[in-house]
Image (cartoon, rainbow, N blue to C red):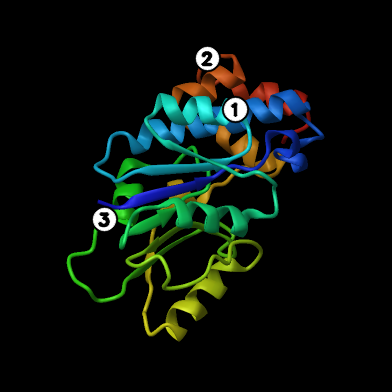
Amino acid sequence: MTEIIIPIKSLTFAKQRLASILTPSERAALVLAMLEDLLATISLLDHGKIWIVASDDAVFDIARKHDACPVCEPKATGYNEAVLLGLEASQARRDVAVLPGDIPLARVSEIAALIAPTSSDKPHIRLAAARDLQGTNGLFLSRKDLVRPAFGANSFSRYRRASQKAGVQPQILEAPGMALDIDIPADLHDLAIRSVGCSIHAFFGMPRGSVSSHLIERGAA
């Protein structure tokens, strides 16, 4: 079964582009709520070990709650370095996936399509794009050394080029639920008005359907 790596940035510096509408403690709580809902979704699937790369005890508490394996990042040196730590910790000889922690709308069917184990030794790469078609919100490798981590601006095109350079035609997944990552106020507004998991609704602190006006008051829309 496919092992999954989820890097989580330090809560101290979490989601700084949301600073105009959320306090530091609220931004940290949002990160934890999104991770909780993502892990709850993954729990509905057959999968190998989950590796949570982070530096905060609060993140590791959630990881253990969902039987995920903590990987301590002693010093934050960047997202791709965190992915490498996860790959090094992974015991998988094949079939490994990387997911960001801030895709709370990811559907069970979308994650299932990303992490489906391969049935042959032929190299295989799957990619799920962010909604701007520049970032990458899902990466599957049938062998963890097929390409080096290259997340960040324009990573989707970089992964496509790297895949082809490795002799692999990547499978591009249509995954609209995975496409929304939460970085800016407009993203948070879009999240608030859509159906999401229970931890996110607990974070917003109000019933379904009433979150949008709350965010508008705080300048998200």
Judge by depth and name the residue closer to the eye, 65 or 40.
65
**Residue hosting label 3:** 116
Q: Mark 2 or mark 1, which is nearer to you?
A: 1
Q: Residue at x 51, y 72 (%)?
A: 159
Q: Which mark is residue 57?
A: 1
Q: For mark 3, does the 10 Å Cα neighbourhood hold few (<14), some (14 to 19), or many (20 or more) residues? A: some
Q: Is residue 97 left or right of residue 116?
A: right
> Which of marks 1 and 3 precedes in the sequence?
1
Q: Is residue 20 left or right of residue 133?
A: right
**As displayed, is residue 122 above or below residue 212?**
below
Q: Which mark is residue 207?
A: 2
Which amino acid type is marked by label 3? Ala
- The percent position of residue 196, horizontal first and vertical second, equals 46, 30
- Work out how far the residue at label 2 is from the one at label 3, CA to CA, in angstroms: 35 Å
Which amino acid type is marked by label 2? Pro
> Which of marks 1 and 2 precedes in the sequence?
1
Q: Mark 2 or mark 3, which is nearer to you?
A: 3
> Which of marks 3 and 2 precedes in the sequence?
3
Contact, mark 3 vs mark 1 (Cβ under 8 Å): no
- Work out how far the residue at label 2 is from the one at label 1, CA to CA, in angstroms: 29 Å
Q: To which quarter of the image does residue 113 belong?
A: bottom left
- The percent position of residue 190, horizontal first and vertical second, equals 59, 38
